[in-house]
Amino acid sequence: MRIFLAGASGVIGVRLTPMLVGAGHQVAGTTRSAAKAGLLRDLGAEPVVVDVYDAAALRDAVVAFAPDLVMHQLTDLPDDPSEIEARRADNRRMREEGTANLIAAAAAAGAGRFVAQSVAWVPLGGAASRETHESRVLAFDGVGVVLRYGQFYGPDTYYEHTIPDPPRIEITDAARRTAQLLNSPTGIIEIIE
């Protein structure tokens, strides 16, 4: 399967990319940073340096790759968890505008499947943003799948040395389970312990 993975250089993307490649899929992985292109190449992906907010460039990149599946693993979260509240609008923009741009690009490319990350809890600020994001994915003209992850824990997460309250999922297990769900039917799937 040809998979366009938006967010391949992120905390779940760096674990998911080699799993997908190892399973025989051709993966184009995105990053906003040209400096991370080598990392993606080392993981086995074709690196694509693009900003999800540049709708035209994103559409061109997705169309050029001609994927069977577009996967949205993008977030806009700070490295320091104490900054989450101050950056809430940035992540909401990613879930709204970023999702809309990715869906439009997937449609333009004729992708038959769209899979997107979401959360298994009511996010800070309420459920409205999550519901808007998820409803767009589920309405994708093809197969739209929402993956509601529990809070990630393990290396490179906010919970490297502690285990958060439920819902939760260890980051490598989350990636493994995601790789197994590529052919799921339209719907919402919770990936939690």
Image: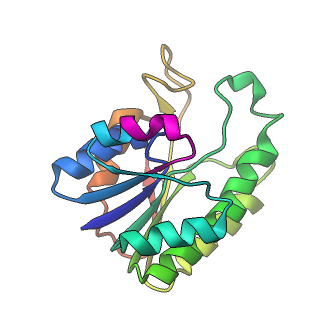
Say which residue appears at 59% left-offset and 66% top-offset: 57
Q: Report x, y in % for residue 133.
A: 65, 65
| 43, above or below 134, in the image | above
Say which residue appears at 74% left-offset and 60% top-offset: 129
Say which residue appears at 50% left-offset and 81% top-offset: 107
Drawn side of residue 182 relative to residue 36, left or right:
left
**Chief secondary structure of the magenta span?**
helix
Q: Report x, y in % for residue 102.
A: 56, 67
Let me know if residue 34 is in the magenta part: yes
Q: Report x, y in % for residue 186.
A: 42, 76
Let me know if residue 3 is in the magenta part: no
Q: Which quadrant does the C terminus fall into?
A: top left
What is the quadrant of residue 81 in the picture?
Answer: top right
- The magenta region covers 30-39
Scheme of image coloration:
rainbow
| 65, above or below 108, in the image | above
Residue 186 seen in the figure: yes
Residue in the foreground of this view, choosing between 38 and 12: 38
